[in-house]
Every structure is written in C-alpha cells, then in structure tokens.
C-alpha cells in the first residue's frame, strides 16, 4: 500500500498517487502494512478503513492481495489481529484477496 500516512489521518497525496499507479492494468497491490503506519498502541479498524477503501476501489479484489506484514506487524498487532482487521475491512474473507490474486501473481 506504499506506507499510507494513517497516523496523521491524511489521505492525500497518497491516495492520488495510489490511484495513478492503479491506472496501470499490470499493477497489483498488497493490503498490508497498515497497523504499523497507524498509532501503534491504539489503532482501530476504523482508523484503517479509509485507506483500505482507497485500495479496494482503485485496484479491486482481482488486483489486491492480503499481506500480513509479519513480523513487522508485531510492533502493533498479532498476526491474528491483522488478519481479522483485513477481513473486516473487505467485508468478508474474499477468496480473491486472500488467495487467488497472490496465487496468480506469484505463479503458485
């Protein structure tokens, strides 16, 4: 996700830059690294939501894949907390985001 400025609450210029990147059909994005860009001790899923919404809208589930950012995420959350937050942010455990996109991109 390119290190969105979650702790500051700013969306721009990050969102505009991310949308410009997403305009290239050969790009994908990893739904990752959010908790360590938020307030490490007090982040909430709602703090992450505007940034997840931008990547979901810009890339769509066919060009978006989950990434835990483990072990770095451990500075702010457990792997399970990161996974739960990501599933809540996308509204369901969308197989495309949590399996299919990565399988295609990494040719697994």
Image (cartoon, rainbow, N blue to C red):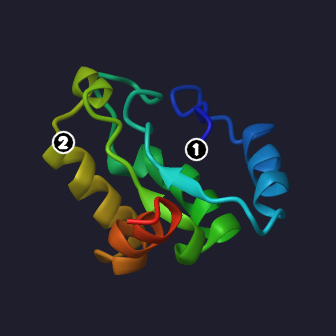
The image shows residue 49 at horizontal and vertical percentages of 48, 55
Question: Total of numbered circles in the picture?
Answer: 2
Residue that appears at 28% across and 74% down: 93
Q: Position of residue 55 (x, y in %)?
A: 61, 59
SS at badge 1: loop
89 w.r.t. 74: above or below? below
In front of the other: 22 or 38: 22
What residue occupies the far front of the structure in this picture? 107
* Disc 1 to disc 2: CB gap under 8 Å: no
Q: Which residue is mark 2?
A: 79
Q: State the image quarter where residue 4 is shown.
A: top right
**For numbered disc 2, what is the local secondary structure?**
helix
Quadrant into which the N terminus falls: top right
* Disc on the earlier residue, 1 or 2: 1
User: 97 or 38, which is in the foreground?
Assistant: 97
Residue named by callout 1: 1
Cα separation, mark 1 vs mark 2, equals 18 Å
Mark 1 residue crowding within 10 angstroms, few (<14) / some (14–19) / many (20+): some
The quadrant where residue 27 appears: bottom right
Whole-percent x and y of residue 32? 44, 45
Residue for point 39% across, 27% down: 36
- As drawn, 28 above or below 11: below
Left or right: residue 71 versus residue 96 is left
* Image quadrant where residue 89 sits: bottom left
Q: Residue at x 37, y 35 (%)?
A: 35
User: If the image is split into quadrants, where does the C terminus sit?
Assistant: bottom left
């Amino acid at each position: 996700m390119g290190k969105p400025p979650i702790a500051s609450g700013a969306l721009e210029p990050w969102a505009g830059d991310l949308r410009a990147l997403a305009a290239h059909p050969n790009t994908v994005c990893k739904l990752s690294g959010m908790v360590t860009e938020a307030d490490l001790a007090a982040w909430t899923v709602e703090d992450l939501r505007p940034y997840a919404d931008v990547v979901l809208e810009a890339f769509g589930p066919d060009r978006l894949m989950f990434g835990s950012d483990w072990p770095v995420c451990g500075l702010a959350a457990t792997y399970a907390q990161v996974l739960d937050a990501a599933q809540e942010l996308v509204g369901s455990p969308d197989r495309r985001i949590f399996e299919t996109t990565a399988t295609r991109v990494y040719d697994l």
